[in-house]
């Protein structure tokens, strides 16, 4: 407990030394006045020290300034009252009072110049700011990580969906590919089979026409049956050639018919009949409008396969990529605010560095020390000042200790997030989830989509030569027959080949474009780029020091 | 036939008062008789005679000899005896060393003036009637005036002239406009003398009258128009600034209309299309005190709410600080009563911000403030800068604030000038800080009580002085100028007791400027205090020790 009694003793000693030279009225007045002065000064200093060392949360600047002013005034008044009631004070008495007044003035001047209240409040503000900043950073990190988590969740969902889309696209594409190619092979086989059937019929017809011994064979019931079947088919067709053939077969079936006689009237009619019979046989074998339609249908499966598979890649997949990218500005906002918060937190820590507070504390300490050793103050007042300084510094030291601890706590708590020179890897992963992104990227690149697409492209590429070869072979198989008889058939085949090749070319062009588009979207480079966290990481790490 | 006889007594024909309290002690000239040998010399009423013919005016060390020394001094009643003792004769030249205020400057100048000793004449006419001077008028004559010449001259004219010329300015008894009328009333006699009794007497009366008239008419000052801006009434300034402010506010909004978007609802700072609003302007509704948010000591102005989004403006940005400084200047030079609401025009920034309000982190878009209407009255265009400041609309038409405490080594005149400026600018705190916080109070018995650390801010008397000063500067006083500063004198040596301060004191003379008949002229009257005492302790800053109003 401070006593602040050294100056009181000092004044009392001066008074004692002087009292014998003073009129009795002055002695009494001074004796009484000094007691009052002691009390006033003690109260002033006690209250002031308590306020300056206050460890509460309230600002004390005004109060300390007010207490210095009122303390000074009260002491000044008490000194002015030292000679109260003395009508004509002696010069010695006046000098005593004036000296006490001047010393008190210097004491309070020095104290006021220290701005103790403001200095104490500065420490208080720093301590308060540190507590405040802890809550602020807590709130911000909570909000940032929550928003980031939502955004990341949506991003990862979209990526997973994209991954699934690709997997499905590959599976579906592979399935469609098999089906489509099988259909093409089947139709190809059907076309391949056409010349075989047509050739056999044609050969039988010509054998029968050219060789007498063969005539019996031709006239055999089997032939008749075959011819009957042809006629039946030709009836369905209702063509003139059908009618001619019908007549021919009628006569052939007649026992009185002589083949040699037939030449006169059969002539061209027979040729026509044979021609019609061959054409009918060709149709019968499958070389009819339906074969073209079936062929186009088969090619349509190829087209649909590519369209569906590649379309999934450039459609729904791209849609997902776009969805993820649409979320990027949101995460960018989170990253920017995170980075800005780091910068602001760093600035805060610099501004509120305990070294700054320590300097303020040291300044207070130095100021108090200089004040207490001010040679213009008498030793007693210096002693009281030193005692006062001790009380104040003791209080402020406690605040400094707490301030240091709070600052360190703040730093430790937020070093991994906002305050470290580097962002903690776990925090970075929490914000970026780069590993998850990498896993998803690996999953996608593991689908080897470029290879799949190349395979699909190759699959498409095999269709054209296969069909072209078959159609060419079909035409070649008719090469041994008289041109005037198979000309229509050749023309028909040529048209079929042209149509199919045109369709093939058109399909190849379309699917090629689709595959090219797909290749661009799912190329390893593009996938890496789409899945890259680097720009975001760069932005995040931009706040590192 | 006129004629005269002369008394045997010779003197300087001066009147003086002893100033034994001055350093050096002296004799102050209060009158120079019309027939004095110093008429026409450079000697002036108010001059301090410190030496005669090179001999300093000093008091004998023996107190019993002092009375005689003073009574026989120049201008004193027994002066002739001194010259008689000295064997002087009429016409003999006397050299006076005088000190004279270095008016318009500082301290005193010392100069030598010479005149002759003259007998005290007794003029009479042929009827042996006493005359005022050779050639009349008769002392008892009236010449149709209501008072004899002798009575008028001795009892009316000379006292009046002396009261004005003998430091009448400093006595507080002279009322210029009243004295002007009094002096003007002398003019018929002055003219009559010149017409009917021309000569040295008439000339001296005319000269004295003219000198006094010139003094009470006052020095004419040319005050530039902006010197009176401080007199503009506060409410007039408020209306003026509010008028131009509202116009400028409207103009800025119109100018930016094409680039301005509806402020609310704001774009979602995270998921919204921020690019669509970046760089666009918003006009925010008034931001009140409670909308200011501090984040660990860093302040932001906020606008918005849950459901409609938020805008944040950094209150410590350069633009915001310029806005706040403009607001502070408004408080200084227009009115301290400016509503604390801020209507802002802001440009939306690229980066959003998180701000913790009520312990909750809130997202918002940040804006750069480009314009602000404060309190609905003060507009500041923050796109405009001059010397690092943005002036509020109408500011350039107002008086600039210059009142501040002068430097610690400022001379006393500068302290008084600062006081006048503070009163003009209604800056009570600066005015108050210019007064000494100590006081020397004389006590019976010749000692004094020194009081230090006086808190004048709580002094009721100071409040009265302040109010009176403001009334004065907004009323009859249009300006006040320091016209003379005394040399400092030591009031306390610092040796009076252990630790005693050295206290110096000086006096500053101020001339007040009023408006009379359309002109600005110096004046004094009983409502103003031309003399100001200043003190300083231990060589510190000069402070005003006279607790008085302007």
Image: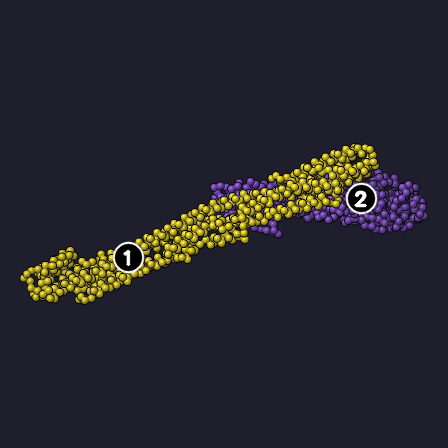
Task: Return the mark for residue A278.
Answer: none
Label 1: few (<14), some (14–19) or many (≥20) C-alpha neighbours in 10 Å: many
Q: Name the residue under label 1.
A: A181
| Residue B258 in the image, given as x and y percentages of width and height | 49, 49
Q: Tell me where residue A491 appears, x and y as whole percent.
A: 22, 63
> Badge 2 local density, few (<14 within 10 Å), some, or many (20+)?
few
Pointer 2 residue: B495
Q: Residue furthest left?
A: A256
Describe residue A389's horizontal placement relative to residue B277 as left or right.
right
Residue B344, image x, y percentages? 54, 45
For residue A386, which quarter of the picture?
top right
Quarter holding residue A463: bottom left
A87 or B71: nearer the viewer: A87
Residue sitting at x 74%, y 39%: A7
Mark 1 element type: helix
Q: In the image, which lettered chain appears yellow?
A: A
Task: Spot the purple chain and give its letter.
Answer: B
Could you tell whether B115 is left or right of A476 in the image? right
Locate residue A501, reporting x and y percent.
27, 61
Q: What element carries label 2?
A: loop
* Residue at horizontal 79 percent and vertical 43 percent from the top: B498
> Dot 2 falls on which chain?
B
Q: Check the picture and name the quadrant holding the N terminus of chain A.
A: top right
Q: Which residue occupies the extreme front position in the image?
A: A1
- What residue is at 66 percent from the left and 45 percent from the top? A364
Q: Tell me whether the residue at label 2 lies in contact with that at label 1, contact meaning CB atoms closer than 8 angstroms.
A: no
What is the distance, in whole Å, between disc 2 and disc 1 at their CAs?
Answer: 123 Å
């Amino acid at each position: 407990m401070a006593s602040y009694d050294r100056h009181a003793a000092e004044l009392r000693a001066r008074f004692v030394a002087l009292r014998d030279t003073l009129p009795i009225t002055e002695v009494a007045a001074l004796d009484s006045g000094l007691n009052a002065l002691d009390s006033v000064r003690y109260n002033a200093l006690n209250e002031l020290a308590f306020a300056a060392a206050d460890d509460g949360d309230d600002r004390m600047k005004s109060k300390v300034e007010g207490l210095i002013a009122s303390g000074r005034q009260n002491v000044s008044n008490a000194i002015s009252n030292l000679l109260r009631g003395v009508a004509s004070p002696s010069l010695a008495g006046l000098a005593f009072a004036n000296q006490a007044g001047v010393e008190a003035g210097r004491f309070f001047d020095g104290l006021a110049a220290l701005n103790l209240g403001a200095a104490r409040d500065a420490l208080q503000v720093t301590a308060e700011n540190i507590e405040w900043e802890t809550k602020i950073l807590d709130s911000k990190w909570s909000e940032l990580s929550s928003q980031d988590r939502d955004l990341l969740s949506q991003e990862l969902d979209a990526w997973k969906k994209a991954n699934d889309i690709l997997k499905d696209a590959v599976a579906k594409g592979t399935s469609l590919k098999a089906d489509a190619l099988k259909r093409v092979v089947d139709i190809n086989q059907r076309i391949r089979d056409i010349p075989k059937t047509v050739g056999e019929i044609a050969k039988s017809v010509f054998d029968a026409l050219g060789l007498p011994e063969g005539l019996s064979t031709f006239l055999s019931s089997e032939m008749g049956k075959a011819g009957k079947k042809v006629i039946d088919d030709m009836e369905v067709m209702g063509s003139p050639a059908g009618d001619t053939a019908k007549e021919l077969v009628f006569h052939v079936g007649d026992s009185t018919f002589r083949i040699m006689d037939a030449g006169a009237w059969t002539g061209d009619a027979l040729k026509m009949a044979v021609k019609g019979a061959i054409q009918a046989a060709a149709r019968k074998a499958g070389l009819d409008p339906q074969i073209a339609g079936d062929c186009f249908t088969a090619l349509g499966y190829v087209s649909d396969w590519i369209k569906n598979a590649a379309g999934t890649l450039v459609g729904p997949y791209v849609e997902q990529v776009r969805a993820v990218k649409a979320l990027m500005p949101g995460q960018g906002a989170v990253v920017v605010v995170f980075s800005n918060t780091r910068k602001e937190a760093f600035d805060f820590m610099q501004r509120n560095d305990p070294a700054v507070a320590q300097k303020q504390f040291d300044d207070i300490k130095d100021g108090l020390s200089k004040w207490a050793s001010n040679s213009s103050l008498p030793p007693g007042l210096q002693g009281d000042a030193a005692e006062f300084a001790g009380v104040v510094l003791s209080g402020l030291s406690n605040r400094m200790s707490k301030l240091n601890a709070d600052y360190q706590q703040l730093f430790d708590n937020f070093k991994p997030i906002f305050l470290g020179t580097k962002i903690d890897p776990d925090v970075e992963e929490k914000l970026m989830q780069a590993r998850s992104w990498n896993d998803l990227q690996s999953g996608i690149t593991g689908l080897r989509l470029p290879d799949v697409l190349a395979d699909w492209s190759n699959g498409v590429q095999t269709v054209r030569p296969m069909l072209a070869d078959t159609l060419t072979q079909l035409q070649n198989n008719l090469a041994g027959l008289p041109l005037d008889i198979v000309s229509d058939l050749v023309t028909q085949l040529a048209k079929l080949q042209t149509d199919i090749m045109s369709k093939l070319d058109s399909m190849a062009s379309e699917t090629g474009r689709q595959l090219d588009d797909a290749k661009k979207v799912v190329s390893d480079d593009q996938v890496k780029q789409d899945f890259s966290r680097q720009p975001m990481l760069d932005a995040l790490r931009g706040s590192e020091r | 036939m006129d004629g005269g006889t002369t008394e045997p007594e010779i003197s300087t024909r001066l009147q003086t008062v002893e100033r034994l309290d001055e350093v050096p002690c002296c004799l102050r000239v209060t009158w120079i008789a019309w027939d004095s040998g110093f008429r026409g010399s450079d000697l002036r009423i108010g001059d301090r005679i410190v030496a005669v013919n090179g001999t300093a005016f000093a008091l004998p060390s023996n107190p019993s000899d002092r009375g005689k020394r003073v009574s026989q001094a120049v201008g004193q009643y027994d002066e002739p005896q001194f010259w008689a003792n000295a064997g002087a004769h009429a016409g003999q030249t006397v050299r006076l060393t005088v000190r004279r205020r270095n008016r318009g400057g500082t301290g005193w100048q010392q100069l030598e003036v010479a005149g002759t000793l003259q007998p005290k004449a007794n003029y009479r006419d042929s009827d042996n009637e006493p005359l005022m001077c050779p050639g009349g008028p008769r002392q008892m004559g009236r010449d149709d005036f209501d008072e004899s010449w002798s009575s008028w001259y001795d009892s009316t004219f000379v006292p009046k002239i002396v009261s004005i010329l003998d430091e009448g300015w400093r006595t507080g008894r002279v009322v210029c406009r009243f004295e002007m009328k009094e002096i003007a009333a002398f003019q018929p006699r002055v003219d009559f003398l010149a017409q009917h009794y021309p000569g040295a007497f008439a000339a001296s009366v005319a000269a004295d009258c003219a000198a006094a008239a010139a003094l009470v008419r006052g020095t004419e000052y040319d005050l530039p128009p902006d010197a009176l801006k401080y007199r503009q009434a506060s409410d007039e300034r408020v209306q003026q600034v509010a008028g131009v402010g509202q116009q400028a506010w409207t103009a800025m909004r119109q100018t930016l209309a094409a680039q301005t978007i509806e402020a609310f609802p704001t774009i979602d700072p995270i998921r919204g299309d921020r690019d669509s609003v970046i760089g666009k302007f918003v006009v925010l509704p008034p931001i009140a005190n409670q909308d200011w948010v501090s984040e660990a000591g860093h302040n932001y102005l906020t606008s918005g709410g849950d459901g409609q989004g938020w805008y944040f403006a950094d209150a410590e940005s350069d633009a915001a600080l310029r806005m706040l400084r403009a607001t502070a200047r408004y408080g200084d030079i227009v009115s301290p009563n400016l509503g604390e609401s801020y209507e802002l025009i802001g440009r939306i920034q690229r980066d959003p911000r998180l701000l913790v309000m009520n312990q909750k982190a809130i997202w918002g878009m940040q804006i750069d403030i480009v314009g602000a209407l404060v309190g609905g009255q003060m507009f500041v265009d923050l796109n405009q800068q001059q010397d690092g400041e943005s002036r509020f609309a109408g500011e350039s038409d107002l008086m600039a604030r210059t009142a501040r405490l002068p430097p610690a080594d400022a001379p006393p005149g500068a302290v008084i000038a600062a006081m006048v400026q503070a009163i003009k600018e209604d800056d009570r705190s600066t005015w108050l800080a210019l007064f000494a916080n100590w006081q020397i109070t004389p006590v019976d018995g010749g000692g004094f009580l020194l009081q230090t650390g006086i808190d004048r801010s709580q002094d009721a008397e100071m409040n009265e002085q302040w109010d009176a000063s403001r009334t004065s500067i907004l009323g009859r006083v249009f300006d006040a100028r320091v016209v003379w500063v005394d040399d400092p004198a030591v009031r306390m040596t610092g040796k009076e007791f252990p630790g005693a301060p050295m206290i110096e004191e000086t006096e500053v003379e101020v001339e007040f400027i009023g408006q009379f008949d359309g002109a600005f002229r110096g004046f004094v009257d009983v409502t103003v205090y031309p003399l100001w005492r200043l003190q300083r302790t231990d060589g510190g800053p000069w402070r005003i020790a006279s607790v008085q109003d302007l």
